Image (cartoon, rainbow, N blue to C red):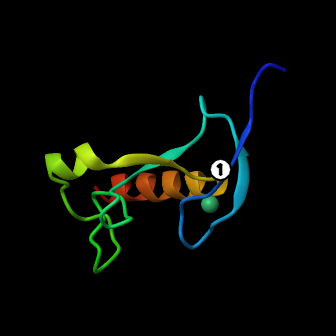
Amino acid sequence: MGHELHVTTCYNPVCRKVFDFDPETVNSVLVDPETGLPPDTDPETRTPTRTPTPEELARSERMPICPECANKMRRRIAREQKQG
Ligand SMILES: [Zn+2]
């Protein structure tokens, strides 16, 4: 008790699941409001291959994502780091 849960829609455009979240522990992604994509994602190829500029990082906001998408993202990042 005492932990307030909020309801939001997963930011991932291919998911859009409505889920409960705790703002203190929620998983989130950094999103550039101008492109609607993470600042390191190339808008044409939709792959995280760009190096974001300081301006892009400054205007980006953290958007909540559901636990399933967070897990997928963690697996993707782990795979990319292995490929190094
Ligand atoms: Zn999701």
Q: Amino acid at mark 1?
A: Pro
**For residue 31, which quarter of the picture?**
bottom left
Image quadrant occupied by the C terminus: bottom left
Q: Which one is nearer the viewer's eye here, 55 or 47? A: 55
Residue at image coords 54%, 59%: 11
Q: Is residue 83 left or right of residue 17?
A: left
Farthest residue, direction right: 1
Q: Residue at x 69, y 63 (%)?
A: 17
**Secondary-structure class at tag 1:** helix
Q: Nearer the viewer, residue 50 or 38?
A: 38
The vertical placement of 55 against 33, above or below, is above
Q: Residue furthest top?
A: 2
User: Is 52 located above or below residue 25 in the figure?
Assistant: below
Give the camera-side residue of 75 and 63: 63
The answer to whether 9 is drawn above or below residue 15 in the figure is above
Q: Give the residue displayed 32% in from the left and 67% down from the top.
A: 35
Of 70 and 14, the residue lying toward us: 14
- Residue 82 image offset from top left, x and y in percent: 37, 54
10 left or right of 42? right
Residue density around tag 1, few if under 14, some if 14–19, many if 20 or more, within 10 Å: some
Tell me what residue is drawn at x 74 percent, y 35 percent: 5
In the rendered image, which quarter contains the N terminus? top right
Disc 1 target residue: 67
Asked whether mark 1 lies closer than 8 Å to ligand 1, one says yes
